[in-house]
DNA sequence: ATTACTGCAAAGCCTTTGCAAGCCC
DNA sequence: GGGCTTGCAAAGGCTTTGCAGTAAT
């Protein structure tokens, strides 16, 4: 939360209730939520918050690199876009193709690759999203 | 194309014209296209192909792991989902946050990480999508 | 006090659903 | 020939837009 306040200040945006609540919802849910689901969760915390504010907040957060849109498991294609938090510009997870469970992990060891790519393409890389698709522990046992 | 025919045969699906054309469009466009854009491109090749068939084909291809939905650059949030080809279950690219250019690359060196994760979480990983966000060569010079 | 942000409601677009005809195997 | 696949059209849901009031700095 403190991070969000600083980020908004630094970029010249105001720290408002909708923005505060959207951030809280994102932090407190392990699952990945769609824009609509985030609005529903925010509504439970404060029913006076409008849908619009949530959508616009998500756009702003994405612009700021605070969150990042991603897609759901293959079973839920086009079932809406979900948003993931980008801690330090990074996000990594494993998605079970069978049950849809999401396992997030921290270490990615991509520094070397980033360096190589920046040299090869003369570009600057600020963050990344890494998604693995597979079958989780539980589903392997059942199968 | 031959790959698609084999894949469909192996999984028990028929090789039809809509499926053939969707595959061709995906292969011939470097940019990432949304469902609607793919339909438009298919329509130019054969106007008798219906929208529905394209949507259902995309769902099927995704189920088969032939393609994978992803999201656009931050500027086009919620502007629809785009589809990327999953060659050998892998896909990697760099997206320029400024102009939206997409640079695809091949080597990712993630084998070691895959191995570590499979051991740690007792899971099996079949493929991945890796997206880097940054600023491309051209945009760096202009700025 | 100024400026940006919020909230409401209607409009808009893409996507989904169901059924008869056609094509692939 | 059998059965999956297609195509059409209407229904459905999420998202976008514009303006007046409100809250943050």
Image (cartoon, coloured by chain):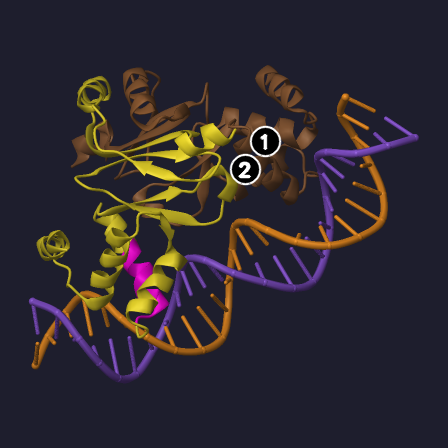
Chain colours: A yellow, B brown, C orange, D purple
Compared with A124, A39 (above or below) is: below
Subunit under mark 1? B
Instruction: Name the quadrant containing residue A14.
Output: bottom left
- Tell me where the magenta segment starts and ends, as one range: A49-58
Tally of numbered tags: 2
* Residue at mark 1: B22
Q: Is the residue marked by circle 1 packed among few (<14), some (14-19), or many (20+) residues within 10 Å? A: many
* Image position, residue B129 (x, y; %): 37, 29
Q: Residue at x 28, y 16 (%)?
A: B112
Query: Is residue A52 visible to the viewer in this orientation of the structure?
Result: yes
Which residue extends farthest front? A141
Q: Nearer the viewer, residue B47 or A107?
A: A107
The secondary structure that dominates the magenta segment is helix
Q: Give the x, y percent position of residue A53.
A: 30, 65
Mark 2: few, some, or many residues within 10 Å (few <14, many ≥20)? many
Q: Which quarter of the rendered picture does the N terminus of chain B lie within?
A: top right
Location of mark 2 (residue): B38
Chain letter of disc 2 in the image:
B
What residue appears at the point 34 percent right and 20 percent down from the top-left corner?
B105
């Amino acid at each position: 939360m403190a991070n969000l306040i600083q980020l908004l200040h630094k970029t010249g945006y105001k720290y408002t209730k909708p923005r505060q609540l959207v951030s809280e919802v994102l932090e407190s849910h392990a699952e990945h939520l769609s824009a609509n689901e985030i609005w529903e969760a925010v509504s439970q915390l404060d029913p006076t918050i409008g849908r619009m504010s949530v959508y616009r907040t998500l756009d702003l957060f994405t612009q700021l690199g605070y969150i990042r849109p991603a897609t759901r498991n293959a079973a839920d294609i086009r079932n809406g876009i979900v948003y993931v938090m980008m801690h330090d510009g990074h996000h990594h997870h494993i998605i079970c193709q069978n049950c849809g469970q999401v396992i997030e992990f921290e270490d990615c060891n991509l520094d070397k690759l980033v360096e190589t790519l920046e040299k090869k393409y003369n570009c600057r890389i600020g963050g990344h999203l890494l998604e693995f698709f597979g079958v989780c522990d539980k589903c392997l046992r059942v199968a």
